[in-house]
Image (spheres, rainbow, N blue to C red):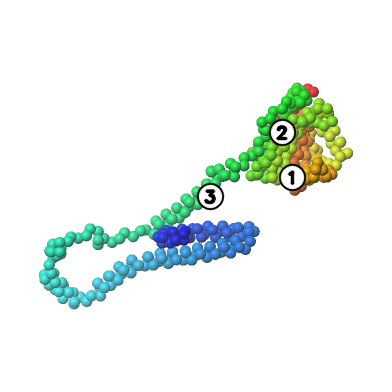
Amino acid sequence: MLGFLIRLLPFWVREPLLIVIGSVLGVRLMYLAATGHGLAAAGFGLAFLVFTAIRVHGVVQALRARRNTNPAASAGGATADAATPAQDRPQAAMSQAQAQAQAPSQAEAQALAGTGPRPGAGAPKKDHNPWAQAVGAVALFGVLGAVLWLGPRFMPSDDVSATPPASCSDETHEALPKAFKQKPRPVTGEEQCEVLNGPDLAELLGTPGEKATTASGSDNTAPLTDGKVARPEAQVAFDTYTVNVSATYNDLSIDQYVKLMKYGEETDVKKLKVHGRSAVFSTDHTMKLEFNLGGSGGSGGPVEQGPLERTLSVALDRGDRGGYCEITVWSESGALPNDTALLDIAEKVLPKIPERHGR
């Protein structure tokens, strides 16, 4: 159907249009072949370029033929007039005069026949300018290409509207534990989640374009503290990485935390300063739990080591007088982002966690 519609177009519209389409597709396919998309793309690209070259050759021949037609016609008429011998011209003039005398005039013949001249019957047909047609075809194709290329950027797609990013709020507001009634009040898990779950988080992780699949915040307390130490946390998960941020309001300093790491299994420990506060990088394994719910009552397997996680722990105040914020990233595949990603997340989250002064 498309080929039939193209054949209906005039020559000077159809051919430039096919040349533009063939050249664009050919160059695009050759570029894909050069960037590692296989020989099939190179073959199709070469076919489109050969097709375009044939069309260009046809247009050039048509322009040459059109350019040579008009001078040939005018030159032929002049040659025929010049070829008439001078000696035959008086005889031709006498014969023409006799014929005019014997034949009725044109007006008398039209009066006898009862017909008049048909308006416009003898006027030559106006030829279209091929260059104007070619430029118009190329301009039309350019406008259509620009609409198809830029349209998705300004029009929201169905996928974007169908799958919005995960929200932190679950519309359930439980009473805060007593540990959150201290002065100044510790930050809540929902507040941490709102700060963490921003549109730039995926870009900070090096995976721009990903959307958060889950986002949550919880107002927990630290284990083995009888609910006296607040430990709010927030977690945002993507297809590639999962980010967890927690703030522990205890009396443990970063220096003491680093000493405890010597008795644990943390590796790649590196001390540094973040926002003028003491901080430390560390790497550890997550825990992997499996539950079998198929049998009666269900059963669980042993606790195993999960994939690696990278953690940045930062003191809650510049004096490192106790308490710390932990930013942890891991993935199911075991891959970890660069430490720069955790530092960027810390720059985003730490200003929203008030420093602990005058404890």
Where is mark 3, residue-wise? 149
Q: Residue at x 15, y 61 (%)?
A: 114
Q: Amino acid at mark 2?
A: Gly
Residue 268 in sight from this viewpoint: no
Check the image and report above or below for 92 versus 10. Answer: below
The disc, 2 or 1, on the residue closer to the chain's N-terminal end is 2
Horizontal placement of 48 versus 165: left or right? left
Based on the displayed image, in which of its 4 quarters is residue 284 positioned? top right
Where is mark 2, residue-wise? 217
Where is mark 1, residue-wise? 331
Marks 2 and 1 sit apart, C-alpha to C-alpha, by: 19 Å
Residue 168: x and y in percent read: 67, 34
The quarter of the picture where the C terminus appears is top right
Horizontal placement of 174 versus 141: left or right? right
Other residues around mark 1 within 10 Å, as few (<14) / some (14–19) / many (≥20): many
Q: Secondary structure at mark 2?
A: strand
Residue 28: x and y in percent read: 56, 57
Mark 2 or 1: in front is: 2
Considering every residue shown, the one lying at the far right of the view is 263
Residue 346: x and y in percent read: 72, 36
Q: Residue at x 13, y 62 (%)?
A: 111
Residue 294 in sight from this viewpoint: yes
Other residues around mark 3 within 10 Å, as few (<14) / some (14–19) / many (≥20): few
